[in-house]
Image (tube, rainbow, N blue to C red):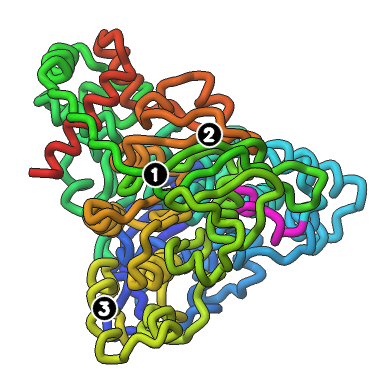
Amino acid sequence: MEKQAIINFDHFTFQYYSQAEPTLHDINLKIYPGEKILIIGPSGSGKSTLGHCINGLIPFAYKGEISGSLTIHGRDTRQLNIFELSKMVGTVLQDSDGQFVGLTAGEDIAFALENDCIQHDAMHERVHKVAEMVDMHELLGSSPFELSGGQKQRTSLAGVMIDEVDILLFDEPLANLDPATGKKAIEIIDDIHCDASKTVLIIEHRLEDVLHRDVDRVIMLNEGRIVADLSAHDLVCSDLLRQNGIREPLYITALKYAGASVTCDMQPGYITTLKTNSAGAHLRAWYKAIQPAPPRNPHPSIISMEHISFSYDGVRPVLQDINFDIREGEMVSLVGKNGAGKSTLSKLLCGFEKEDQGIIRYRGEDMHDKTIKERAELIGLVMQNPNQMISKAMIYDEVALGLRLRNVPEEEITPRVEKVLKICGLAPFIEWPISALSYGQKKRVTIASILVLDPHILILDEPTAGQDYRHYTDIMEFLVEINKLGVTIILITHDMHLMLEYTPRAIVLAGGKLIADTAAAFVLTDPQVIEEANLKETSLFNLAHMADIADGTAFVQGFIDYERKLKNR
């Protein structure tokens, strides 16, 4: 007797009323009780739309035309209301700001229990238990507006975990999390899946990070169609990831660079199951043949912090005695756990906050008396949350806004706006309203609105969060090009792949203190720095040890040098 599917798409097609073509085409998919499914695909592939169909946002919030059927627990979703579906499917949204309903983190986590009239003592006990699982137990009294992006995401995760639903849907749960918290989130999701027998669906760009724990199947979408339904092992052995613009795990890339064949009998879907017996010799020979990259010529200092300390309330220090010097034309990563002080540091550089102690210098000159407007001529900041930057209804007007405020002639504005929109992958949407864009597309609008101003220093807070690999690469390669022209770039990021690939140097914060200022390869191979800053050891380091390469740090650096050499050809 065939097992009954808990979710069943049968020749399901969906078209938004505002679109000329369907977003989902003839979807046939069965998901069974207790399965853990990863859904991947490039931006615009229909991943989030598929999720919205499951959790009821389609058709109740986003209207469109449906053909075929979608049943959950054997009931057609068109015959259910949004409340009934919310008792079947719990969702963590990609944009956590759109999910908050409480005045504090604790209230938000407890919301579902309040709706169900759970007794006060039992509610408190469950809230504290779940908050502890996601490391939010000390911030239950905090307003959502006081939380970092990662803390908001963890609050949303707890709010879904607390309700007794059969299906849990996570829409890019790692987007705003530091590496160690992201790793823990995947472990928490896996524990819930195993212990409570939940059906778990994860929509995520960061394939390797999700594959920290087992999944039953990986569903790949592109252009609204299912193009693969495979195990993790079968998927990474195929060329489907590259063909569909999705980043493959770094250790798989290294194996291919070394000329090793990646086959299913190696069990390559997870670094923990990978068998390197047949590949070890290839890896060792490739590593020995890599030529180290020549050192870059030193340039004069462009921005520096000397003994900087800062507190928002005068009681709790956020930054303590920070010292660093960034040279003209550098591309540097600023990394560390959520709440370490990274975004605060960028606010001090831009003048949004004033340091309590110490000196910030631009080309050797004390910036203390420079206004925010004066600093904006030198330093451009792209914030983590696009909703905090966007102020116009139309894309063109948003990107042109800074130029218009600077009284640039309109005939000069148009080609500059068109150029950056093309670079940021938004050229087809130049006349679109911003409200029609996805969260990831809004991120690209905010990057374009700053790039168009030609700043000397560009600070980007999580520039690639929510971006697929193609758009991630387009944006980063563009940043590399303007970096070569002399623009200094500071990337605040949780993406350790980005740090390794693009920034030779990383500044690491933990607890408001600078704990490392060194090569990116060293940061991801030093156990003490990894633990203090909530980072995660790179799989390349694990691969080196599996191949009996003694110096794992040098192997990681060799991989970086080799990849940069390929890109510069």
Name the residue beneath numbered marker 1. Answer: 301
Q: Amino acid at mark 3?
A: Arg
Q: Which mark is residue 180?
A: 2
Per the image, label 1 sits on a secondary structure element best described as strand
Q: Is residue 428 visible?
A: no
Q: Residue at x 30, y 64 (%)?
A: 45
Label 3 packing within 10 angstroms: few (<14), some (14-19), many (20+):
some
Sequence-wise first label, 2 or 1: 2
Q: Main secondary structure of the magenta part?
A: helix
Q: Is residue 350 left or right of residue 312?
A: left
Quarter containing the N terminus? top left
- What percent of the width, then of the height, locates residue 546? 29, 13
Q: Residue at x 34, y 25 (%)?
A: 271
Q: Amino acid at mark 1?
A: Ser
Q: Give the CA separation, mark 2 to mark 1.
A: 32 Å
Question: Is-magenta flag for residue 115?
Answer: no
Q: Quadrant of residue 444?
A: bottom left
Q: Nearer the viewer, mark 2 or mark 3?
A: 3
Picture layout, residue 507 above or below residue 367: above
Q: Residue at the front extreme?
A: 365
Label 1 packing within 10 angstroms: few (<14), some (14-19), many (20+):
some
Per the image, label 2 sits on a secondary structure element best described as helix
The span picked out in magenta is 143-153
Label 2 packing within 10 angstroms: few (<14), some (14-19), many (20+):
many
Q: Is residue 307 left or right of residue 520?
A: right
Q: Which mark is residue 416?
A: 3
Q: Residue at x 35, y 86 (%)?
A: 408
- What percent of the width, then of the height, locates residue 315? 82, 44
